[in-house]
Image (cartoon, rainbow, N blue to C red):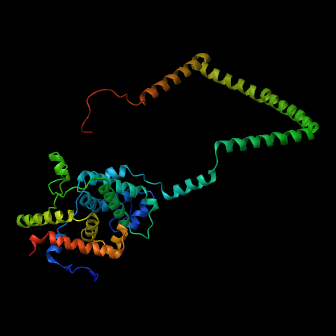
Amino acid sequence: MHQESNLPRVPDDDPATERALNAIGRFSPQRGFEERVVSRVRVPLPHWLRGARDYARSLTSGVTGWVVLATFSLATAAAWTAAAVIGAQYSGEVAEVWRQGGREIFRVVRGDIANDLLPLWGVARAEVAQWLGSLGLDPQTAVVGYGAVMLVSAVGLRWLTAEPRKTRGPVDVAS
Amino acid sequence: MTGGWDLAAASDQQIVAWAQDGEEFAFRELVRRYQRPVFSLIYRMVRDREIAEDLAQETFVKVLNAIDSYRPEHKFSSWIFKIANNAAIDHLRRREPDLLSLDGAPDAVSAERREATALQVRDHGESPLDELEARELGSHIEAAVAGLRPEYRACILLRHVEGRPYEEIAAILDLPLGTVKTYIHRARAELRDALGPLRD
């Protein structure tokens, strides 16, 4: 060991002192120390997840509810203004397009319903009624019965999958 | 091995890197590695097992919760010993100085309290005669170390129990290297005087 010249002369290789210092050991904390420490430690998120979170935060840093509200208001006002300007500028054309378009859409929808959907529904209903009749069932009774079966099934499933209710009783110490 | 990582062979820096990446096993490994050194240092500084437990726990919580701020160019051991020593010194400054007793602190009013505040001498697991001799020597050295000034005590414990180099002790205690050498030199001189009756 390096000795400084102005120190009093005490041999560092003094055998008794060395022997005594070698007798110094370490102590152990009480059992469960590790658990007590770890339970109080905030384990950080994985690196990649922290990166993603930090990136998202950097994008939204400084954004408050007022900023969102103001942006939304401005965007809405701009859209309405643009629509109003366009409407005023091309009101005749827009009205004509709406008239023609509306009429066309109404005609198509009405034609589809009258020509396709209603006949199809009538055919399907007649087929099902015929099939139920062959089974000796009245269609209305079958519909009600089907609904009742679904309701009973739902209640039964809910009851079967419900968590057991906690009840008072002896505590299982072993567990 | 944990999840393919060889913990036994891993350096402190590697373990810390895993901890910084959110691996809980790395936190546990750091606690396992340093719980005895940190607790021993604090226990010998404050001489109260319960307080030493609390301070050691606070030390680990403080270090592990700030693990992101750890810089790998420094030794992890220096960092944790520094915080442990500061915790012990802060505690010693807060409380009234008391007299040394291997039988328990002077303010101990109950048998449990006396037992809690008495330094327990290490059991070496040797033959009865050797063990008796070792325990007697251990009692003397523990008493002698406990009688040192706190700064001398920290130096001598870090040097002779933890085997830290002078430079690291200087970093841990925020002292100039020359001061550390002087403290250790004087501490050894005081220990030699205190152990006088046991000298060959």
User: For this rendering, which residue is in front, A15 or B143?
Assistant: B143
Q: Number of marks in the image?
A: 0
Position of residue A49 measured from the top left corner of the image (x, y, whole percent): 52, 55
Q: Quarter of the image for the N terminus of chain B: give it.
A: bottom left
User: For this rendering, which residue is in front, B71 or B107?
Assistant: B107
Residue A153 in the image: above or below residue A13: above
Residue occupying image coordinates x 61% and y 54%: A58
Judge from the rendering whether residue B158 lies leftward or rightward of residue A114; answer left or right. left
- Quadrant of residue A174 within the rendered picture: top left
Position of residue A150 measured from the top left corner of the image (x, y, whole percent): 53, 24
Position of residue A51 measured from the top left corner of the image (x, y, whole percent): 54, 57
**Residue A112 appears anywhere in the view:** yes
User: For this rendering, which residue is in front, B157 or B97?
Assistant: B97
Residue occupying image coordinates x 64% and y 21%: A130
Q: Quarter of the image for the C terminus of chain B: give it.
A: bottom left
Judge from the rendering whether residue A38 lies leftward or rightward of residue A112; answer left or right. left
Instruction: Name, please, the residue furthest toward the right.
Output: A92
Residue occupying image coordinates x 15% and y 69%: B194
Instruction: Name, please, the residue furthest toward the bottom.
Output: A5
- Quadrant of residue B6 within the rendered picture: bottom left
User: For this rendering, which residue is in front, B84 or A77?
Assistant: B84
Instruction: Name, please, the residue furthest toward the left.
Output: B129
Judge from the rendering whether residue B59 lies leftward or rightward of residue A71; answer left or right. left
- Quadrant of residue A97 within the rendered picture: top right
Residue A159 in the image: above or below residue B160: above
**Residue B124 appears anywhere in the view:** no
Residue B131 in the image: above or below residue A109: below
